[in-house]
């Protein structure tokens, strides 16, 4: 019930293309869904997050789409750039302080020229 | 923004020795800190949750006598890997969740690469 499944495991996108990463969760009590970006040898950094009361959130080139009934959410990176090449993790948690994050397995994105 | 630092950024030690890793919240007070380990090309695995002034809560399968966590102040948590062995070699990352965080946001440190010879 605590799992978050993430796909694909790896993704290659041409510069300017759209990168799409999908996640699915089981626990309907989750109510906060962040996405993290991690470069090699660095800690994860929060990219964007969404709560289940909205179906979409956009920040710059990054958009989260959320489907509550399907228990799925996805990250879309528009106009992908080589600098976006990193590992992306989705996560889920319960709203409120000190709640643990449940991470997806990660997606290694490579944006080619 | 909220900044979390870790020290050292990397450490190499001999098998059987103990290693201490520090995690500091630089510009905010962290009531709760989390410790993760990450193996190459894998996701983050939560090891323990520490709250200032109280004992850490360890995840199932994590040896609390081997991975000692101390959260003595609102800005500092330490992880000590005792009697380290090569299988403890990993990337250790801490995160902090402060009282002012919106929607339970966790701020991650840059990580510490531990190599045990």
Image (spheres, rainbow, N blue to C red):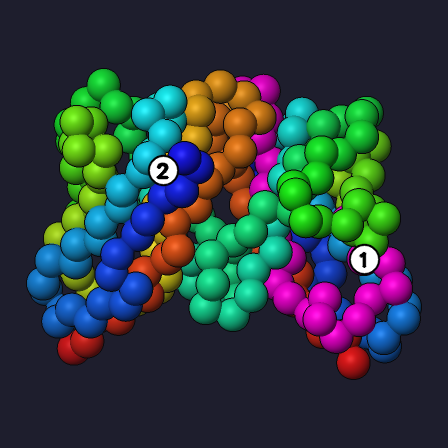
Chain bearing tag 2 is A
**Residue A99 vertical placement versus A109 (above, below):** above
Residue sticking out furthest to the bottom: B117
**Residue holding disc 2:** A34
**Residue holding disc 1:** B81
What residue range appears in magenta?
A: B79-100
**Residue A60 vertical placement versus A28 (above, below):** below
- Counting from the top left corner in percent of width and height, residue A38 is at 42, 57
Q: Is residue B98 visible?
A: yes
- Counting from the top left corner in percent of width and height, residue A33 is at 34, 34
- Counting from the top left corner in percent of width and height, residue B40 is at 52, 70
- Residue in the picture at 43% in, 63% down: A39
- Specify the quadrant that holds the C terminus of chain B: bottom right
- Residue in the picture at 53% in, 39% down: B107
Chain bearing tag 1 is B
- Counting from the top left corner in percent of width and height, residue B27 is at 62, 33
**Residue B83 belongs to magenta span:** yes
């Amino acid at each position: 019930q605590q799992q978050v499944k993430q796909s694909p495991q790896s993704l290659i996108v041409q510069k300017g293309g759209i990168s799409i990463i999908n996640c699915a969760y089981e626990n309907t009590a989750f109510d906060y869904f962040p996405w993290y970006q991690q470069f090699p040898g660095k800690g994860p950094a929060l990219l964007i997050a969404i709560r289940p009361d909205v179906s979409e959130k956009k920040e710059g080139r990054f958009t989260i789409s959320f489907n509550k009934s399907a228990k799925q959410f996805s990250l879309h990176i528009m106009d992908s750039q080589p600098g976006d090449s990193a590992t992306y993790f989705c996560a889920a948690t319960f709203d409120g302080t000190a709640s643990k994050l449940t991470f997806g397995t990660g997606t290694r994105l490579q944006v080619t020229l | 923004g909220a900044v979390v630092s870790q020290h050292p950024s990397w450490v190499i030690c001999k098998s059987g020795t103990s290693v201490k890793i520090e995690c500091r919240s630089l510009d905010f007070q962290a009531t709760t800190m989390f410790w993760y380990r990450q193996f190459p090309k894998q996701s983050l695995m939560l090891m323990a949750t520490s709250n200032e002034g109280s004992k850490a809560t360890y995840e199932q399968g994590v040896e609390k006598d081997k991975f000692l966590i101390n959260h003595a102040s609102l800005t500092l948590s330490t992880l000590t890997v005792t009697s380290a062995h090569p299988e403890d070699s990993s990337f250790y990352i801490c995160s902090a969740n402060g009282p002012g965080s919106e929607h339970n946001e966790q701020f991650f440190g840059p990580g510490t690469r531990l190599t045990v010879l």
